[in-house]
RNA sequence: GACCGGGUAGCUCAAUGGCAGAGCAUCGGCCUUUUAAGCCGCUGGUUGUGGGUUCGAAUCCCACCCUGGUCACCA
């Protein structure tokens, strides 16, 4: 079957004298713009009185062929680009001549083609580019393979509009194959469904499944809107090292690499935090960074080894100013990109499966109060009783609940495994045990807790925010008494401690998982649906 | 890493121990208003890989590979 397509490629080259891999082409407009250019009055006027001139706008479009219907001497194709799921073109033998018509007939699904002609509806009312029809388009051109057709060879309207003195030029073809596809396309009805193939061959997924293109475009729009928001608030976007000699700023295992010239072991960053704080020391008052973090951890529907994180720091702020910032920013972004603060997730049948209400104000509750509200037990500095442990275990058989830690760790365990997944509408969880957060200030009234929030939306943590610890002595002590797996503990970054000794203003800081935010806003069930090229193990030969 | 499910034609899927199939795509015809076009005809397979059981394996067994989900880790 591939051989058949290759043979067609050679025919395009030999028989039609065309380059099956095309060249630069001017005057193309997106399919959506072409559709919008349709002029109903002009169409009607021409249909009523074709002899009184052709007022219909002429467009030149390119797209991938998604459908190809040959009706004898008239061919309809549905083209797709990033702006339109299926703008129809029609190639009529009478309008384009025998040669071009043969080429159109030879065209395969998934080829990329160019068509030029007036916009008119069909009998069924579909806006269609009628290749080569009317006064504004021509046949294949005057090259060696020029055919004999009865369309006038005048330059296209689109070109003459652009210049008051149009240069004489080779007339643009009414229809041409600009890129031959040598791959067999997925079925035109079901498309590409297999998740594995979709992630491996995203280039097919993107053109085959319009919702994928849409989701990715929404991701881009969300990030753009966040940048706009932060810049409006006076934040400077900075870039800090991804190759680090000490990985800090979070508790996670890093990827290891090596710099040859310096013979230096390096890790990919797990967080930019410690460098952004150095910028506060240096005098930048408001900074943010949107970029990749790398964590050598498991893969799941909510985890990809490289993921995109926003971190922002504001001198003289606190976790409360950051909560205000995140709340306002997310609402602004949702309003700008989606036009609503009510986010609905839908299944394949279009039924709403989850509704997230982003209306302000968002709930704020301390972790102890929230866990008590949901479990009836106050996990507050006292170890959980055997009864409550037995009850929670029996009520949550699928979960592997670990109560072997300190009371603080028990509280966090219950919150993260049992409560957080139930937090669908935005909820700021505050007063997190300070022992698990070495980079934040302790609460002045009760130093058992840290001055931080953890924002959960859609059942996952979207954003943490801190009143950043700026006391070098406390910071050093925290580094030296960390809890948890040794492999994930933060290394002691002496230069960072030196920066704190130079003096960092009190500050608010926050991180925001971009991928999870996009999942929440678009309803994507897997992080892989919002990352263009998620990590996949290579297929064995 | 553990457990459960999946891998059959380009795509979407059937076939539970007895000739490996359908729709669409492909290929050859007919057709100038179709749009999952229609009609006629034809193709297309190392059933993920390697072993085993059996007269006979897509189907049962073992190992491995890739993968979706859950759990663990983590954001």
Image: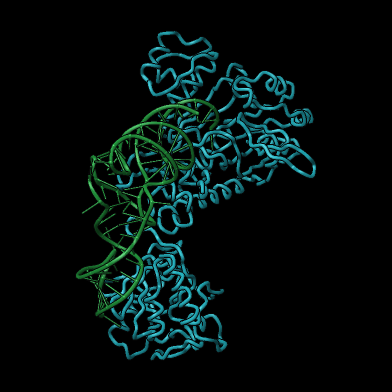
Chain colours: A cyan, B green
Above/below status of A92 relative to A220? below
**What residue appears at the point 48 percent right and 57 percent down from the top-left corner?**
A203
Above/below status of A481 relative to A264? above
**What residue appears at the point 68 percent right and 35 percent down from the top-left corner?**
A315
Q: Nearer the viewer, residue A540 or A56?
A: A540
Rendered location of residue B23, percent (x, y): 25, 60
Q: Quadrant of residue A356?
A: top left
Q: Nearer the viewer, residue A524 or A313?
A: A524
Rendered location of residue A101, percent (x, y): 38, 81
Above/below status of B7 relative to A69? above
Q: Quadrant of residue A71?
A: bottom left
Left or right: A413, with A97 as reference point: right
Rendered location of residue A478, percent (x, y): 68, 21
Above/below status of A254 relative to B47? above
* Residue A362 shows in this picture: no
**What residue appears at the point 47 percent right and 23 percent down from the top-left corner?**
A415
* Residue A430 shows in this picture: yes
Count of picture labels: 0
Q: Nearer the viewer, residue A533 or A248?
A: A533
On the rendered image, what quadrant is the N terminus of chain A found in? bottom left
Residue lying farthest to the top in this orientation: A386
Q: Nearer the viewer, residue A363 or A346?
A: A346
**What residue appears at the point 64 percent right and 25 percent down from the top-left corner?**
A489
Rendered location of residue A195, percent (x, y): 41, 47
């Amino acid at each position: 079957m591939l051989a058949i397509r290759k043979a067609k490629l050679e025919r395009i080259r030999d028989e039609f004298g065309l380059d099956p891999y095309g060249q630069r082409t001017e005057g193309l407009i997106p399919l959506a713009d072409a559709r919008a250019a349709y002029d109903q009055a002009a169409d009607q006027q021409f249909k009523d009185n074709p002899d009184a001139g052709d007022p219909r706008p002429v467009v030149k479009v390119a797209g991938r062929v998604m459908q190809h219907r040959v009706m004898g001497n008239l061919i309809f194709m549905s083209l797709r680009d990033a702006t339109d799921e299926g703008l129809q073109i029609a190639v009529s033998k009478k309008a384009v001549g025998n040669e071009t018509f043969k080429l159109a007939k030879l065209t395969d699904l998934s080829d990329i083609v160019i068509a030029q002609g007036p916009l008119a509806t069909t009998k069924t009312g579909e806006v269609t580019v009628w290749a080569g029809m009317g006064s504004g388009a021509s046949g294949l051109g005057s090259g060696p393979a020029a055919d004999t057709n009865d369309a006038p060879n005048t330059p296209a309207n689109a070109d003459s509009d652009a210049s008051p003195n149009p240069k004489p030029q080779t007339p643009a073809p009414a229809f041409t194959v600009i890129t031959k596809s040598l791959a067999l396309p997925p079925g035109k009805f079901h498309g590409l469904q297999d998740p594995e193939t979709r992630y491996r061959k995203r280039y097919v997924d993107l053109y085959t499944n319009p919702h994928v293109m849409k989701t990715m475009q929404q991701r881009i729009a969300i990030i753009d809107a966040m940048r706009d928001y932060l810049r409006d608030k006076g934040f400077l976007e900075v870039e800090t090292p991804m190759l680090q000699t000490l990985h800090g700023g979070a508790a996670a295992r890093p990827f290891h690499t090596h710099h040859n010239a310096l013979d230096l072991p390096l890790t990919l960053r797990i967080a930019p935090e410690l460098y952004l704080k150095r910028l506060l020391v240096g005098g930048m008052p408001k900074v943010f960074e949107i970029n990749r973090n790398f964590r050598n951890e498991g893969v799941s529907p909510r985890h990809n080894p490289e993921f995109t994180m926003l971190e922002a720091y504001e001198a003289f702020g606190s976790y409360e100013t950051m909560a205000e910032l995140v709340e306002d920013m997310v609402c602004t972004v949702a309003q700008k990109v989606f036009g609503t603060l009510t986010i609905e997730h839908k299944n394949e049948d279009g039924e709403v499966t989850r509704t997230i209400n982003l209306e302000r104000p968002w709930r704020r509750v301390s972790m102890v109060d929230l866990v008590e509200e949901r479990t009836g037990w106050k996990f507050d500095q006292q170890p959980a009783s055997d009864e409550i442990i037995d009850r929670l275990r029996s009520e949550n058989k699928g979960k592997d609940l670990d109560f072997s830690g300190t009371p603080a760790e028990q509280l966090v365990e219950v919150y993260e495994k049992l409560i957080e997944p139930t937090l669908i509408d935005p909820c700021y969880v505050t007063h997190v045990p300070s022992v698990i957060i070495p980079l934040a200030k302790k609460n002045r009234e009760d130093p058992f807790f840290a001055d931080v929030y953890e924002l959960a939306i859609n059942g996952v943590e979207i954003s943490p925010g801190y009143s950043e610890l700026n006391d070098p002595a406390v910071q050093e002590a925290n580094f030296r008494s960390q809890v948890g797996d040794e492999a994930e503990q933060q290394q002691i970054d002496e230069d960072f401690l030196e920066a704190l000794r130079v003096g960092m203003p009190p500050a608010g800081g926050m991180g925001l998982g971009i991928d999870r935010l996009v999942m929440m806003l678009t309803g994507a069930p897997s992080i892989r649906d919002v990352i263009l090229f998620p990590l996949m193990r290579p297929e064995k030969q």
